[in-house]
Amino acid sequence: MSGTGLPALSRTALTRLAPEQRPVVDPARLRTRVVHFGLGAFHRAHQAVYTENAAALSGEPWGITAVAPRSAETVRALRDQDCLYSLTERRPEGPRTRVVGSVVDALAMGPEARAVDALLADPEVTVVTLTVTEKGYQRLASTGGLDHAAVAADLVADPAGPLTTVIGRLATGLAARMRAGAAPITVVSCDNMAGNGAVLSRMVREFVAASGRPDRDRILGRIAESVAFPSTVVDRIVPATGAADRAAAETALGVRDELAVTAEPYRQWILEDSFAAPRPPWELDGALFVRDVTPYQLTKLRLLNGSHSALAYLGLAAGHTTIAGTMAADWGERLVRALCAEVAPTLPAGGPDPAAYGDELVVRFRNPAMRHALRQIGSDGSLKITERWLPALRTLRATGTAAPVLELALAAWVFCTRPPSGVTDPAADALAACWDGSRRPVETVRALLRAVDAQDLADDTTLTSAVTERLPALQAGRIEI
Ligand code: CS2
C-alpha cells in the first residue's frame, strides 16, 4: 500500500483487474529471448506491445529483458512492479488502459554489466532492439563515423566492467558472443534515423576495430557473417507521462503504477526483412516486413518528424506548449500540409502517398486527448534537424526548388536556440555561443548551421538570408506561412 491507499501493480495484483485490463500473455510463461536497450516510454508503448501480441498469438515464449543505459531508478521501479506497467491508449471515444506483460526483467547497464553481457552471449537470445535516441549512437555528423572522443573512456575500460555508452556495451557484448562461437543474432535499431540499421552496424564495427584487441579482425569477420542489422521505421506518438496520466491510469486500474505510459491509438512498425536468427513473429500483430525500408523511412522522418519539429519550434515561438495547441491555431494544419507538399519531391518512389500521409498526420496531431509537449519534441534539435530537414533542404536547393516552409522552420529553430533557450540539446553550449552579441543576425544563422555540421548550407547565402529575413516576424510571435 502507498499514500494513495492502492496496492502497487504486480503479478499477484493482476487478479484485481478486469479481464480486458490484464496482459494478453502470462508473463510467467515467457523467457528472455529479446534484449532491449532504452527503457523509455516509447519502447514500452511500441516494441513491447508488438512482442507481447506476437507471443500471445504464436504461443512462443518471447519475453524481453529491458536494459536502462542510465536510469537505475527506472529499473528499480519496474522490478518493484514485477516488470509490469500499464498503457493507456488515448482514443477519440475515450481512454483505454491495460497492463502489458512482455517485459520479464530489467537491468541497469552500468551496475549490472555482467548480467547484460551474459544475455548478449546467451544462445536463447536472438534479438536485440534499441531505442536510445539519436544521441545514443555516438555518431559524428561531419563524417558519419563513430565519435572516438565520445567513446574513448569505454575503449580503454575493463570490458567486463561498467561502460558508459550503449555502443560500447553492445559492441563488447557482441564481440564476446562471437568469441564464444554462440548463435547468430539480429540487432534492430528503432530510432528515428535514415538507414538506422547501417548506422548502428557501422558504430558497432568501428568500436570493435578501435578496441585494440588482437583478435579484432577475426571478430569483425564473424560479426559480418552472423549479426544482422536491419533498418526499421517505428511510429507511435508517445508523450512523456505526466502526473495526471499516472493518476488516470491508477483510477482506471485500481492499482498504483509508477511506470504508466500513454500513447495515441495509431502504431506502425516496418522492418527490413533481413534477420540472422529467429525473431518474434511481429507480423502477427501488423508489423510489415519489406525488402527496402528507405521510402517508408524517409517519408516518416521528413513528413511526420519533420513537421513535428517545425510545429515544435514555430509553436514555441508563438507561445504554445503542445502539438494539439499548435493544431488549434490557424496556421498548424496549413504548416503540416505545406511542409508535406514542399518535401514530397525529395522522397523516393515506393512509399506512402505524401498528400494522404499529410491528411493522416493532421488527424493524429489534432488528437486533443494527447498532451505532447513542444519542448520534448524540440529537445536535441541539433541531431534531429540533420535527419528531418537538412537532407530534403539540400535536395531542393540542388534542383533550384523554393523551400519556404523549411526555411521558416529553420528560422524558428534558430530563434529557439537563443539563450536562455529552455530547450535541451547535447550541443547547447556550442549553439548558445553562436549568439554572441557582436554578430549580425545572418552571421548567427551561419554559425548555427556550422554548429550542426552543415557547412554547405552555411555557405549558401541565398538560404541564410531567407532564414534571417524570417526572424523579426518570429520574434514578434507571428507565424507567416
Ligand atoms: C517526435 C517523435 O519527440 C520527437 O522528436 O517527433 O518522438 C515522434 O513522436 C515519433 O517518432 C512518432 O513516431
Image (cartoon, rainbow, N blue to C red):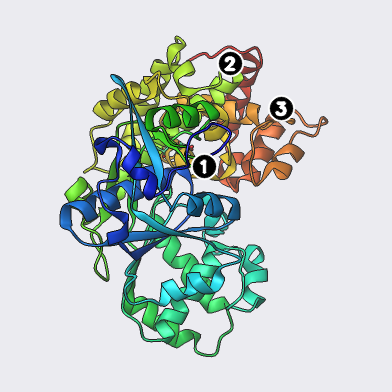
Q: Is residue 285 left or right of residue 200?
A: left
Residue 384 is marked as 1
Residue type at mark 2: give it: Ala
Beta carbon at label 3 within 8 Å of ligand 1: no
**Residue position marked by numbered label 3 in the rendering:** 441
User: In the current view of this chain or complex, which residue is farthest to the top?
Assistant: 330
First in sequence: mark 3 or mark 2? 2
Tell me which image quadrant ligand 1 sits in: top left
**Residue position marked by numbered label 2 in the rendering:** 318
Report, in whole angstroms, how far the alpha carbon at label 3 lies from the one at label 2: 20 Å
Q: Secondary structure at mark 3?
A: helix
Q: Is residue 303 left or right of residue 173?
A: left
Label 3 or label 2, whichever lies nearer to me, is 2
What residue is drawn where x is 45% and y is 28%? 403
What residue is drawn where x is 46% and y is 81%? 176
Beta carbon at label 1 within 8 Å of ligand 1: yes
Q: Quadrant of residue 94?
A: top left
- Up the image or down, 185 lies above or below 308; here it is below
Residue type at mark 1: give it: Lys
